[in-house]
Amino acid sequence: MTEVLKAVYDEVAKCNKCGFCQAHCPIFDITRDERNVARGHNAHIKKLIEGELELNEELKDPLFECLLCRSCVANCFPAVRTDRNVVAGRAEYMRRVGQPKIMRFLFHNLLPDQRKMAKYVRLGAYGKNSGMTKLVRALGILKWFGKDLDKVEGIIERLPTRYFREIAPSLDLGPREGKPKVAYFVGCGFNFVLPQVSVSTLAVLVHQGIRVDIAENCCCGLPAYGYGDLEAARAIARKNIETLERMDVETVLTECGSCSAFLKDYPELFEDEPSFRERAEALAKKVKGFSEFMQPRLSSMGKAKELLVKVTYHDPCHMSRYQKIVKEPRAILQAIPGVQYVEMPEADRCCGAAGSYNIMHYEQSMAVLAKKMENLKKTQAQILTTECPGCLIQLSYGVRKEKLPVEVIHISQLLERAYLGN
């Protein structure tokens, strides 16, 4: 038994096999396969630890089909951390079966180096925008990433070729005198895919009179962690902790719900390194998500213009269940003059994006998304807001597929529209 599995044995043993998780698992709802539900995952991992089960290709799909959405955790009486147990299982799978070379290259070479990452993403953008991805499929490249790449290609219509970090030097970052108050942590999704969201976020912060310094951070490390590469996740976390410590700010802010959640969870990566855990804990206390940071400060934003529009909100899993940030975004939306806020049924149910889940498991992801779109239709909202790049991309794709007259935007973009008129 490896140390990674040994560390979660007590946690998997807490599962009493009641099956209450079945009613709350988006993937079990689709597959009706016991291997996909929390008690199935915990039973598998317990048997792996006890040596009663072999880890082979047959267990790959159940392990990697979990969304890590924590819906099971939120509805589990003993609160078993099934998400953490599944990641441990994935780590063990990668150790025994082997990690694809392209995945190791991504996690160990690209994610820690944003400049190198930008070069490769730009190549991908040119390929996507020029149709070269068809050639990639024809050559059989990236087979590990799923059989539905022809369908996956439509999730993003077009990739930008100018990223936020390239736009940033031309932006107003607030007063330069004195100590910086906020370090802006640049998430990969907003930097490379949705740079306009980052621009709106900074505009709102500066409008409030806050000095913002843009961090020279790399990826938060969540993609590596999610696929069980704990070595890469720790290396990335160390790099970010050291970078952010040098900035000496009161707050580390990101409008990416996944980034803020994982930054707050950094201490879990260093349970066996007490000194570094303390540094991770110090950072975690400074981290704020966008609505978490802005909601208490909304009264100092000045007068907003009236927006006569019906708005609803989707809770990213990393906001509602990982960080318990639920009231703040709704309070912001309800405070904007003219906004008619309507609650979406099952607003906190996963949209099926889950990082790269919609690439790796397209059909399951689309089935989860279809339910989200049905709930969106019930609201008759004109604007759907959220706080995660993966959710924004997935929900926008769903709206396009369903041909719904709904605009999908980040909550910072709506605030910019209300307070700055942009």
Image (tube, helix red, strand yellow):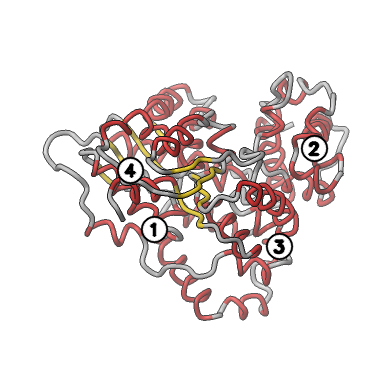
Residue 111: % across, % down = 47, 53
Of the numbered discs 3 and 1, the one sitting upstream in the chain is 3
| Image location of residue 4, percent across then percent down | 66, 32
Residue 232 shows in this picture:
no
Label 4 sits on a secondary structure element that is strand
Mark 3 element type = loop
Amino acid of disc 3:
Gly
* Residue position for label 2: 37
Which residue is denoted by mark 3 in the rendering?
A: 146
Measured as percent of width and height from the top left, residue 109 is found at 48, 56
Disc 2 crowd rating (10 Å Cα; few below 14, some 14-19, many 20+) is: many
Image disc number at residue 195: 1
> Could you tell me which residue is drawn at 47 percent across and 75 percent down?
126
- Gap in Å between the C-alphas at discs 3 and 4? 34 Å
Q: Are marks 2 and 1 in contact (CB under 8 Å)?
A: no
Q: Nearer the viewer, residue 401 or 147?
A: 401
Residue at image point 42% right, 32% down:
292
User: Which image quarter holds the N terminus?
Assistant: top right
**Total labels drawn:** 4
Any part of residue 302 in sight? yes
Label placed on residue 184: 4
* Spatial separation of the CA atoms under disc 3 and disc 2: 21 Å
